[in-house]
Image (tube, helix red, strand yellow):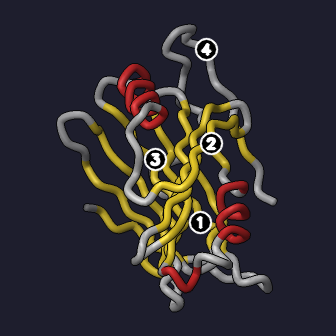
Amino acid sequence: MTVHRVRAGALDASGWSTATSTRGNFVVRLPCLFNDFSLQGSETVVATDTVGCRREDQQKYSATRVKYQQGAAAARKRFDDMSGPRRLEGETARRRLMFNGFPAIEVDFRSSTQCGTTRSVLVGADLLLLTAEGPPTACSVLNLPAATFFASLQIALPALQSQEQNTPVESAGALE
């Protein structure tokens, strides 16, 4: 693991910071100071690049870019697996949507120990995984910050090229 930054960022007047991943080519807004780190991959994953934080009230937010050894085909297979009948423990809802032109899946979950939402966005040969979660005491207030966090995703794609057409892909997403 390579740790790039710890408790980084500056909270604005609303209590949010802008987190730019050092190697992941993405930016999100987080409701806390954040850590930024990368992990080298395994047999199927080249690397993961993550920014994330845990607040004093135990709410956690993370955004991870997963880069696959087999490129777009492996990312698409993983995304399709997420879309299939497999369900997360405690899953309460699942939605397919488009995020700035990219296919995405959003899953809500709740158990006796945690609740939250994950959003997986398929971006060419990569998956971006965003998670907002917290203890049961946070369930009633987690939706609004999770929606703000998910909507803040900016994806930089200057070096990414379409596997099928070998044409540049423009950046997507906007901070609000």
| Mark toward the start of the polypeptide (1 vs 3) | 1
The local secondary structure at tag 3 comes to strand
> How many residues crowd mark 1 within 10 Å: few (<14), some (14–19), many (20+)?
many
Q: How far apart are marks 4 and 3 (CA)?
A: 21 Å
- The N terminus - image quarter: bottom left
Residue hosting label 1 = 19
Rendering coords of residue 88 (x, y %): 40, 51
Q: Do the residues labelled 1 and 2 touch (CB within 8 Å)?
A: no
Residue hosting label 3 = 65
Rendering coords of residue 155 (x, y %): 62, 44
> How many residues crowd mark 4 within 10 Å: few (<14), some (14–19), many (20+)?
few
Residue hosting label 4 = 167
Instruction: Kindly identify the amino acid type of the residue bearing the numbered disc 1.
Output: Ala
Mark number, residue 95: 2
Q: Which residue is at a point 31% across and 23% down the rendered structure image?
A: 70
The local secondary structure at tag 4 comes to loop
- Looking at the rendered image, the disc whose residue lies closer to the viewer, 3 or 2, is 2
The local secondary structure at tag 1 comes to strand
Vertical comparison of 141 with 39: above or below: below
